Image (spheres, rainbow, N blue to C red):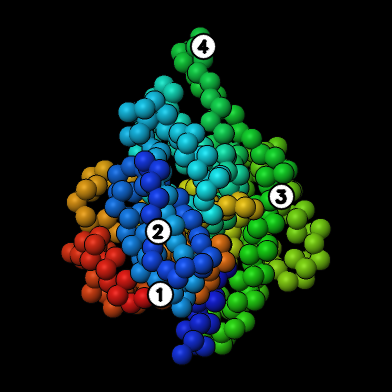
Amino acid sequence: MYSALRSVQLAARRTAPMSMSMSMSTSSAGAKSLTIGLIPADGIGREVIPAARQVLEALPSDVMPARLNFVDLDAGFEYFQKHGVALPEQTLAALKGDCDGALFGAVSSPSHKVAGYSSPIVGLRKKMDLYANVRPVISGAAATASGERRAIDMLIIRENTECLYIKEEELHEGADGKYAIAKRRISEFASRRAGEMAFSMALQRDRMRQQVAASERTWKGRPKVTIVHKSNVLSVTDGLWRETVRGVYTGNAEYREGVDIEEQLVDSMVYRMFREPEAFDVVVAPNMYGDIISDGAAALVGSLGLVPSANVGDNFVVGEPVHGSAPDIAGKNIANPIAAIRSAAMLLERTGYASAALAIYRAVDKVLEAGQTKTPDLGGRSTTSDVTEAVCRLL
C-alpha cells in the first residue's frame, strides 16, 4: 500500500482479474531467494513478528517466486538485561552479511536512564544507515478533530539518523540545582537525503495514481511535499533543515515542474493534521518531529496496530510496526498483527516483490473491510492468531 506503491494497489484492483537458526519455506529448487532477518525483540514483538512470518510463508508462488529464508536474531531491552547489550554484534553481522532485509518487532526501552543501555532500533538505524523512516497513513474514513470522517492518503518521511536522537546529553550541577543539556545535530547531508526521498516518492506516488481513474483517487491534486520545521525559533538547526530540503527542490527541474511545495511549523502541522488531514500528501520532517507526527497520525486511522513503517536506506530496509511493546497485553495473543504484516509487505516492496506486497495489502484490506475479525484495539474479540489466519486464507 504503503509507500509509493499504495497507488499501485488501487490500480491493481482495477486491472488484475537466534539464536541465529535459519529455516526455509517450501519453494521450487533453484529459485531466487530472499533472506529476512527476524528481530521480535520485546513484548508483543514476539507475537506480531511470527504472525508476519506466517503471512509471508503463506504467499503463493505465482506472486512470490523467491524462496524465503528467515534468520532469527536477538535484540531488545530484555536481551540487554540478560546479556548487557541491547543490539549484539552478531545480530548486526548477520544483517550485513546474510540478510536482504529485516523485520523488527518492538522494544521496551525504559523511560528512565539505565546505565549502558541504548535503544537497539535507534542503533540499528545508525549502524545500517537507514536514514529515512517511511510511514503511510491511509484511510477511507479518517476520524478528524471535528468529528467528520475524511479520506486520507498521507506519507510521512522522517529523517532517521540525527536531531535530538543522537542522544548526546549532559547533566550538570548549577547554583539553582541540576540542569540538563541535550545536543541536536542537523546536517546538510542527512537533510538532503531525506528531501530527495520525499520529492522522489511524491513523483512516484503520482505516477502510480495516474493508473487509477480520477474519481477513484484519494489525493486528487498535484503531488505535494510539506516541509515541517520550527525555524522561526530554532533558526540555526531547523533553518539548515529548511534551507537544505528546499535546496533539493530548487536544484532539480523535475521536482520544480512536477511537485508543489509548502512549509508548516511543527505545532501548526499537528493542528492541521487533526483538523484537515486530507490536506497533506507527502510530509518530510526532522527525526523528533517526524516521530511525534507519525505516531499521532495513527489516531486518524483508529489504532497504532494498523500502521506500518519501513526504515529505509540505499541498500537495506527494516520493516517495523509503529506500535510499542505493549507489556500489558504481551503474551495474551490479542495484539493486532496488522501493522507488522503491512510492514512485511513494505519490505517486499522495497526488495522488488511488488506483486507479493500487493497480495498482502489486498488480503489485509479485505479482512478489515469485512469487520468480522478484529482484535480488541479495534473493538473486537479476535486473537492475534485469528487475524493472521484470516489474512492467510485470503492470499
Return the residue at label 1: 60
**Residue at the spot 23% in from the left edge and 74% down from the top edge:** 372
Instruction: Say whether disc 1 or disc 2 marks the residue closer to the N-terminus.
Output: 2
Return the residue at label 3: 192
Instruction: Say whether disc 3 or disc 2 marks the residue closer to the N-terminus.
Output: 2
Question: 38 or 260, which is in the foreground?
Answer: 38
Q: Secondary structure at mark 1?
A: loop
User: Where residue 126 appears, x then y in whole percent?
Assistant: 57, 39
Instruction: Say whether disc 3 or disc 1 marks the residue closer to the N-terminus.
Output: 1
Callout 3 amino acid: Arg
- Distance between the Cα atoms at labels 3 and 2? 39 Å
User: Which numbered mark, 3 or 4, is in the foreground of this view?
Assistant: 3
Q: Secondary structure at mark 4?
A: strand
**Residue at the spot 21% in from the left edge and 48% down from the top edge:** 331
Residue 22 vertical placement versus 343 (above, below)? above
Question: 73 or 7, which is in the foreground?
Answer: 73
User: Which numbered mark, 1 or 2, is in the foreground of this view?
Assistant: 2
Residue 105 vertical placement versus 154 (above, below)? above
Return the residue at label 4: 174
